[in-house]
Image (cartoon, rainbow, N blue to C red):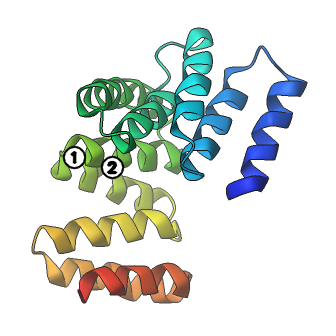
Amino acid sequence: AEEGPEALAAGQKAIELAPDQYMGYTNLCRAYNDMKLYQQAIKTCNDALKMQPGDGETNLYLGLAYDRLKQSAAAKDYFKKAITGLNEFTRSNPDYSDGFYLLGNAYFYSGDDKSAIEAYRKTIELSPRFARARFNLGAIYFINGKKDLAQEQYNALKEIDTKIAAELYQIMNK
């Protein structure tokens, strides 16, 4: 996955090449969030939603931007829309692990750990080496006092991505 300035440049280029395609705006919105440019993220996500109003991924990123700006009521509304859109997306794309990963994130940010766990487990079932899904699942397990299940995710992560495994280790040993 691209990060930071590279993701920003890729999103801008996608919009330049296909200004009528919402996904470029969605990806640019994600990049703005990653770079903590939340006002730009909000504007760009809204541009995407004008083209694809129910898109779960875009609503998730919009919710994150509002969450980071401490506008919890708006964030909650967009996370709810994200869950609706991503449930629809995963029903139509039941073999696409990224959709379940994003759904897990939407549930997590909505405070529904049980549904987040289900979505992350489905992600891993479809894509066992999906490191971020394992990290998120391990963190939720740990937060919910299921240390043995968190340890399982950590052990699996050590074989997949040592950097992300180290991040989970930090959470589990605070």
Q: Residue at x 34, y 23 (%)?
A: 81
Residue 17 picture quarter = top right
* Residue 56 location (% of width, % of height): 45, 28
Name the quadrant of the N terminus. Answer: bottom right
Look at the picture and state if 12 lies above or below 130.
above
Look at the picture and state if 33 lies above or below 2.
above
- Identify the disc placed on residue 115: 1
Q: Residue at x 33, y 49 (%)?
A: 119
| Towards the viewer: 45 or 21 | 45
Q: Secondary structure at mark 1?
A: helix
**Residue closest to the far left:** 145
- 6 relative position to 162: left or right: right
Residue, disc 2: 119
- 145 relative position to 91: left or right: left
Q: CA distance from mark 2 to mark 1?
A: 6 Å
| 2 and 1 marks in contact (CB < 8 Å) | yes
